[in-house]
Amino acid sequence: MRADDFRSNLQADRATVETCIGCGSMRTFSACGNGCDERPVELVSAGDYDALIASAAACRERLGLLLAPVDVLSPGEDDALEWRAVYLAARMAARTALANWRATNHQPDVTAAPLETVTVWRCQDCGGLDAPQPCIGVCKWYASEWIDALQVDRAARMASDDEDTERRLVGLLGRLAHSTPHDEDWERSVRALRAEAQSIDARSRGGAIDTLQPACVS
Ligand SMILES: [Zn+2]
Ligand SMILES: [Zn+2]
């Protein structure tokens, strides 16, 4: 999945809620008259969510760079048992990919902190919402945007899986970029690298991300 698709795939429903600038009280007037069926719901600020998605999409772009050498290692129709040539082509691709990856100036672990949530009481029927706080003065309301924390969890899991894939790929490519097989055993080296690359690749292209797609569409 490309970064753009990834981003649009993670568009979440936004609720606009009046929030007090002083005490943090939140409210959306109910339409049920006197019988709202309110339940506790966790929300995350839309601004925090947007930052998470931007960081996840940037990680997707970086994964695109890192997966190029994996394609070189993959068995293809021109896999004519010229193991030395396959190894050297993959090593060259790994060096290029790592240089391109370093040029993105990515700072690992900056985005690792979990997002802050607030708990509100929301009506299942009309969307009326209430989260009072003791306010010392007169409340001053402004409109703020919020997203259900359950939708945020899904995106956060995908982002964290991608970051894990990125770390593994950087480790694999780093080893490949700076080594030559002992005793010139090119075949065994290519096969070992291929197996490791395929297990990482399967995770990033299938695995967690694809199984989550249908949930995003529904
Ligand atoms: Zn209601
Ligand atoms: Zn207030």
Image (spheres, rainbow, N blue to C red):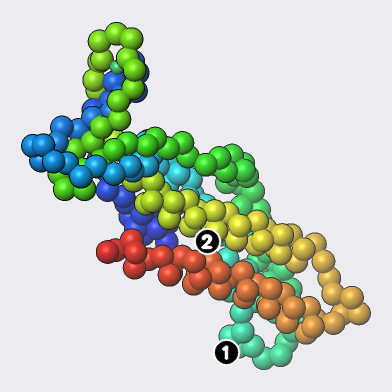
- Residue that mark 2 sits on: 64
Q: Give the x, y percent position of residue 164.
A: 61, 57
Q: Nearer the viewer, residue 186 or 115?
A: 115
Report if residue 147 is visible in the image.
no
Q: Residue 89, position in %: x, y? A: 69, 73
Residue 90 horizontal/vertical position (percent): 68, 71
Of the 4 image quadrants, the one containing the N terminus is: bottom left
Q: Quadrant of residue 4?
A: bottom left
Label 1: state its secondary structure.
Answer: loop
- Callout 2 amino acid: Gly
Q: Nearer the viewer, residue 194 or 116?
A: 116
Label 2, ligand 1: CB separation under 8 Å: no
Q: Residue 50 location in percent, x, y? A: 39, 41
Q: Residue at x 32, y 14 (%)?
A: 135
Mark 2: secondary structure: helix
The answer to whether residue 187 is left or right of residue 200 is right
For image coordinates 34% across by 58% down, the residue present is 9
Indicate the quadrant containing the C terminus: top left, top right, bottom left or bottom right: bottom left
Name the residue at 58% across, 85% down.
Answer: 76
What distance separates the C-alpha of mark 1 from that of mark 2?
23 Å
Residue at the disc numbered 1? 77
